[in-house]
Image (cartoon, rainbow, N blue to C red):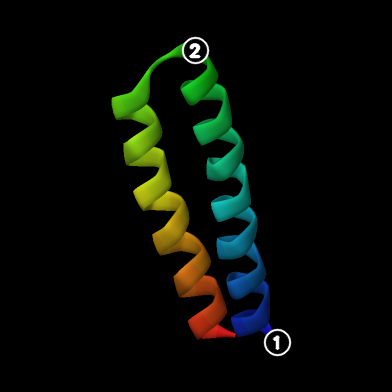
Amino acid sequence: MTDNLLAVALVFIGLFLIGGVISLFRQGVKIGAAICVVGAVMAITAGVLWW
């Protein structure tokens, strides 16, 4: 059960980072948005694969 909770947490972190990407892109901080995109993709991928 704890494995599934960790996977859910990783997906949640990924979604949180996607929100950060949207916010940073609107502010014009494209480098920060690019870094957040990489983190979001890694977090969501890890959560899905761990599931």
Tell me the crowding category of disc 2: few under 14, some 14 to 19, or many 20 or more residues within 10 angstroms, Cα based. Answer: few
Question: Image height check: is 35 above or below 10?
Answer: above
Identify the residue shown where x is 48% and y is 23%: 24
> Which of the two residues, 49 or 31, is positioned nearer the viewer here?
31
Nearer the observer, disc 1 or disc 2? 2
Question: Image height check: is 13 above or below 29?
Answer: below
Tell me the crowding category of disc 1: few under 14, some 14 to 19, or many 20 or more residues within 10 angstroms, Cα based. Answer: few
Residue situated furthest top in the rendering:
27
Amino acid identity at mark 1: Met
The residue that mark 2 highlights is 27
Amino acid identity at mark 2: Gln
Question: Image height check: is 43 above or below 17?
Answer: below
Question: Image height check: is 20 above or below 14?
Answer: above
The residue that mark 1 highlights is 1
Query: Mark 1 or mark 2, which has the lower sequence index?
Result: 1
Identify the residue shown where x is 53% and y is 42%: 17
Identify the residue shown where x is 66% and y is 69%: 8
Q: Position of residue 18 (x, y in %)?
A: 56, 43
Q: Position of residue 48 (x, y in %)?
A: 56, 78
Q: Position of residue 11 (x, y in %)?
A: 60, 63
Q: How many marks?
A: 2
Q: CA distance from mark 1 to mark 2?
A: 40 Å
- SS for dot 2: helix
Q: Position of residue 31 (x, y in %)?
A: 29, 27
Image quadrant assignment for residue 19: top right
- SS for dot 1: loop
Image quadrant assignment for residue 33: top left
> Which of the two residues, 46 or 3, is positioned nearer the viewer here?
46
The label number, if any, that marks residue 51 in the structure image: none
> Which of the two residues, 5 or 42, is positioned nearer the viewer here?
42
